[in-house]
Image: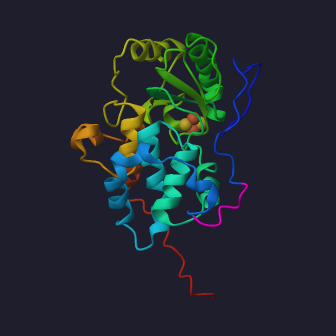
Amino acid sequence: MSRTLGPEAPATPPSEPEHAIDEAGGTTAQHAGLAAVDTTVFDGVRDRAAAVIARYPEPRSALLPLLHLVQHVEGHVSRAGIAFCAEALQITTAEVSAVATFYTMYKREPVGRHLVSVCTNTLCAALGGDDIYAAVRERLGGIGHEQTSADGAMTIEHAECLAACDLAPVLTVDYEFFDKQTVDSALEIIDALARGEKPQPTRGAPLTEFRAVELLLAGFFDDPAVGGLDAVAGPSAAEESLRGARLAEERGWTAPPVPDQGDDS
Ligand code: FES
């Protein structure tokens, strides 16, 4: 989701997305415009695409993981990626574009080796998230939202609430959490990533790289390309997040029963 906060100005004007919504209407995956798109870059994942599609009763239901598979290959959803999905699912490129441009996890420009997402939503912002974002972008040469450092190491983005408000301010690297950050601790993470290191997230799995995580998100959890099952190992819940549930358990508190939907008395 693009938005402008504070005085930030993009270092370079954003380029026109190469896969703006299909103006041809995308009548079928075989329409004339699509025939010109070369999708051979995805030849190495056609078997994986077939495996994704086979998980669902309807091929079109496989679109979300298939878009992650596309990002595993190219680091973003290109025009070729849209054509590949349309072809594989026998739907229109317009339908694929509509989904790919709706969800912020599908990137319209190539992402660097790592994606750094700084939460600048209300609670994190109030506790220092805006300062962290400003410091991170400064450290990376003044780049802006969804832009990539000159060495290709990192892309940064403002993130909406990452559902870790009890651990604010937070940032994620390739969707793994670094909780309770300060400007200094965030810059240590950025410097480590710039040196090619993979700092340990506060919780969750060890860091890999953006494209490897995209293979996980496509549902290939035990693939050697992402480090096998170790890639998804690690505790995902923080002690702070579990405290309420533990307290309720100790005191015997339970949630009120769900009303019977059919009972209108
Ligand atoms: S506001 Fe940052 S995690 Fe909720």
From where the camera sits, is residue 241 visible?
no
| The magenta stretch spans residue 32 | no
Q: Nearer the viewer, residue 64 or 7?
A: 64
191 to 264, vertically: above or below: above
- What secondary structure prevails in the magenta region? loop
Q: In the image, is 67 to the left or to the right of 23?
A: left
* Horizontal side, residue 190 vs residue 143: left or right: left
| Of 108 and 164, the residue lying toward us | 108
Q: Is residue 261 visible?
A: yes
The image quarter in which residue 15 lies: top right
Q: Quadrant of ligand 1?
A: top right
Q: Is residue 20 left or right of residue 92?
A: right
Residue 213 versus residue 209 in the image, above or below: below
In the picture, the quarter occupied by the N terminus is top right
Eyeballing the image, is 9 above or below 259?
above
Give the residue at x 34% y 17%: 197
Estimate the x, y position of residue 58 in percent, counting from the top left: 45, 72
Question: Which quarter of the figure has residue 32?
Answer: bottom right
| Residue 57, image x, y percentages | 40, 74
| Residue for point 41% across, 46% down | 42
Comparing 92 with 226, the one in front is 92
Tell me where the magenta segment starts and ends, as one range. Answer: 23-28
Most foreground residue, 81 or 163: 81
Give the x, y percent position of residue 54: 35, 66
Quarter of the figure that contains the C terminus = bottom right
> Where is 35 relative to 118, above or below?
below
Residue 118 position in % (x across, y down): 56, 28
Q: How many marks?
A: 0
